[in-house]
Image (spheres, helix red, strand yellow):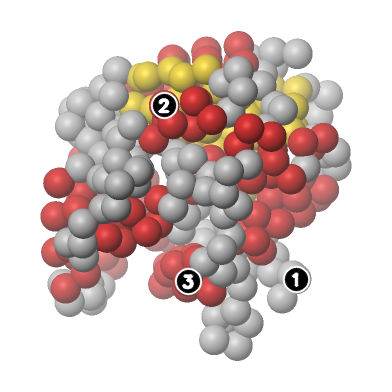
């Protein structure tokens, strides 16, 4: 089970301050843009990014034969740190990667020098259930997290009933359409850049279909997220949300409220992706936050 190989790469000097980048569900590490990684490295950071199990160049699993949960995906973070010789690092997580960062900051505070959470939801907030109810048209109970924007819900409802794409071109077109929705409406969408990125994602995946195992992992361990524990986070925390976040709108403020001393930063125009217009602002904020 735990011998799934994890692909990772690092940039910068080994003696520099370490930042571990944790991408979201079903996402390869290269979705941390090269330009953003370059800015962090130029700022004197040793930057590590990796592919989650069942994505990109990391090992794939026959889920029926070897099921796993998000607890295993979380434990892969420790494995990456150990493989790079790190007792602790600055964790920067995007979307579900931010959730993993929050959980690690709760359960192993000595491993987390600081926490940066981007486009994420509060640990224990039940974001998965909110999403499911939104997609299936069920009402949200009182006190639920804000649900995704209508255009996001509409896109994924349509996707759920659409026939699967049959070839590389159609698959990549579908991936670009999804990226456009995640990008939000606050900044121009660069379709050529999106195509280059999704072609790269497609071409470096051992098996593109196994990323869906992350959904099966969520179903296999529905109690993965502890509830009511964010007050235990000791790491200095920076929470970043785009002003046009389509998936988890307003969730950043809730995270920042629940973690003692956390700071909330809103990036104008940003949705749920990390487009070039945001790299300078994001890099500056992360470099400041991780200065030791």
Give the residue at mark 1: 3
CA gap, disc 1 and disc 2 = 38 Å
* Disc 2/disc 3 C-alpha distance (Å): 27 Å
Total of numbered circles in the picture? Answer: 3
Residue 58: percent from left, percent from top = 61, 62
- Report how far apart the C-alphas of labels 1 and 3 lie in the structure: 22 Å
- Badge 2 is on which residue? 253
What x and y, as percent, mark residue 83?
A: 81, 50
If you read the primary sequence from the N terminus, does the residue marked by circle 2 or circle 3 appear first?
Answer: 3
The percent position of residue 80, horizontal first and vertical second, equals 73, 50
Q: Position of residue 246 (x, y in %)?
A: 26, 39
Q: Secondary structure at mark 2?
A: helix
Q: Nearer the viewer, mark 1 or mark 2?
A: 2
Crowding near the residue tagged with mark 3, few <14, some 14–19, many ≥20 C-alpha atoms within 10 Å: some
Q: Between residues 182 and 123, which one lies in front from this camera angle?
A: 123
- Disc 3 marks which residue? 219
Q: Nearer the viewer, mark 1 or mark 3?
A: 3
- Residue at screen point 16% across, 73% down: 161
Which mark is first along the chain, 3 or 1?
Answer: 1
| Quadrant in the picture for the C terminus | top right
Work out whether residue 47 can be spotted: no
Q: Quadrant of residue 45?
A: top right
Q: Residues within 10 Å of mark 2 (few under 14, many from 20)?
A: some
Q: Quadrant of residue 240?
A: top left
């Amino acid at each position: 089970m735990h011998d799934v190989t994890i692909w990772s790469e690092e940039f910068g000097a080994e003696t520099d301050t370490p930042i571990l980048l944790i991408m979201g569900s079903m996402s390869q590490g290269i979705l941390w843009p090269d330009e953003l990684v370059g800015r962090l490295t130029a700022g004197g950071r040793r930057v590590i990014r990796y592919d989650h199990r069942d994505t990109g160049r990391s090992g794939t699993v026959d889920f029926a034969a070897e099921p796993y949960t998000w607890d295993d995906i979380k434990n892969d973070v420790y494995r990456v740190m150990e493989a790079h010789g790190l007792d602790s690092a600055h964790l920067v997580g995007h979307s579900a990667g931010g959730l993993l960062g929050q959980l690690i900051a709760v359960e192993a505070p000595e491993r987390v020098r600081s926490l940066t959470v981007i486009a994420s939801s509060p640990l224990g907030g039940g974001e998965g259930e909110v999403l499911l109810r939104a997609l299936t048209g069920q009402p949200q109970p009182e006190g639920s997290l804000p649900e995704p924007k209508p255009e996001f819900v509409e896109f994924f409802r349509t996707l759920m009933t659409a026939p699967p794409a049959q070839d590389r071109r159609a698959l990549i077109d579908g991936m670009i359409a999804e990226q456009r929705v995640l990008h939000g409406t606050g900044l121009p969408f660069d379709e050529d850049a999106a195509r280059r990125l999704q072609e790269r994602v497609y071409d470096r995946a051992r098996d593109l279909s196994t990323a869906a195992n992350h959904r099966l992992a969520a179903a296999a361990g529905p109690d993965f997220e502890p509830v009511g524990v964010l007050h235990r986070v000791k790491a200095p925390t920076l929470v970043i949300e785009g002003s046009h976040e389509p998936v988890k709108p307003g969730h950043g403020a809730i995270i920042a409220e629940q973690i003692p001393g956390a700071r909330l930063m809103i990036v104008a125009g940003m949705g749920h992706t990390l487009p070039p217009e945001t790299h300078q602002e994001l890099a500056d904020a992360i470099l400041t936050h991780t200065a030791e």
